[in-house]
Amino acid sequence: MKINRSLSRCLCISSLLFPLLALLPPVAQAKWNYYRLGNAEDSTAAPKGGMALMGGGSKLEAAYQFLCERANGGDFLILRADTDEDYAKKVNAEIKAICPLNSVGTIVFSEREDSDDPKISEIIAHAESIFLAGGDQSNYVRFWQDTPVPEALNRHIAAGRPIGGSSAGLAVLGEFSFSSMIDTIHSPEALADPFGNKLTLTREFLRIPLLERTITDTHFVKRDRLGRLLVFMARILQDGWTARVRAIAVQENAAVLVELDGTAQVVGDGPAYFMEADATPAVCAHKQPLTFSGISVVRVAANQTFQLNTWKGQGDAYILSVVNGAVKSSSTKHDPY
């Protein structure tokens, strides 16, 4: 009889509990994937710091070599979004072929919930060198911002370990970023309306001291992105995010390789552009063409150098301005590029 009563109580409790459990939201399952080539055991190598700022394209072996060598035979980690398994494994093999490494791994993110998985932070913590792949930077902002992922990346950066990014991966390395949350934006559209709904900016995504007060852009001359970058700079000043803004713009198939002391060399097809402004734009308003003056530019060709700490270096220097939405250059040689 006692057994029957106990069983009856259990059945009664269960009948009350199951409907309540049905009301609970389902537990989100992480959908990220990790593909690793090489040694399954993590390396204990001591890496050498530096940054590879890559403008996108397919001819960037010198930049990959830079990040690879600075891993010092350790673990090379790639972070990307929405890539199929075959492509991720192909890139792993290509990086592994560049120089001796303990392993090459790729984490592919599918949604924001992936970033809360502590395993990802652990993998990032054990990487000697990290590369942020190209794609759509809005995915990185949506999936990573205000999650443990940028926290883990910032610890990697603070430890003086190498990091790089190409295209979308470079777009999120600066203190300021074009987040592309609605869609990309082209120069004519941005210059005509600096407050258009596609012009979405974010800041403090990562903390890289050499890229403080800086926004980056890629595929620069190839996709005619000068006008939109000037608008990004104008908006950052207009919105009071900083009193002095800098920009680094890298051409497709080129890269800027940066030492920890701020010395930067342009490699590949070049050039790269180092820009700075500290004057609030004369006109920067909704549905009004931009008017903005006093933007200094140093155009640094391949194999030339620039110092990020002093913001001086080799190359052609000139001044840009925007008058009623039209870009003007003080240089007849570089008008405007």
Image (cartoon, rainbow, N blue to C red):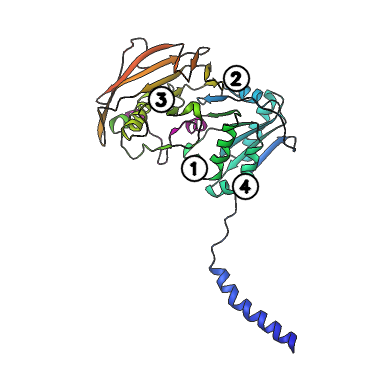
Amino acid type, callout 3: Arg
Quick check: 101 left or right of 186?
right
Q: In the shown orientation, is residue 36 left or right of residue 331?
A: right
What is the C-alpha distance between the residues marked 3 and 2?
Answer: 25 Å
Q: Is residue 273 visible to the viewer in this orientation of the structure?
A: yes
Residue with the mark numbered 2: 62
For marks 2 and 4 on the same chain, the one whose residue lies earlier in the sequence: 2
Dot placed on the residue nearer the N-terminal end, 2 or 1: 2
**Image quarter of the C terminus:** top left
Return the residue at label 1: 145
Crowd rating for badge 4 (residues with CA inside 10 Å; few <14, some 14–19, many 20+): few
Of the numbered discs 3 and 4, the one sitting upstream in the chain is: 4
User: In the image, which residues are magenta?
Assistant: 166-188
Snapshot quadrant of residue 71: top right
Dot 3 falls on a residue whose secondary structure is strand
Residue 246 disc label: 3
* Secondary structure of the residue carrying numbered label 4: helix
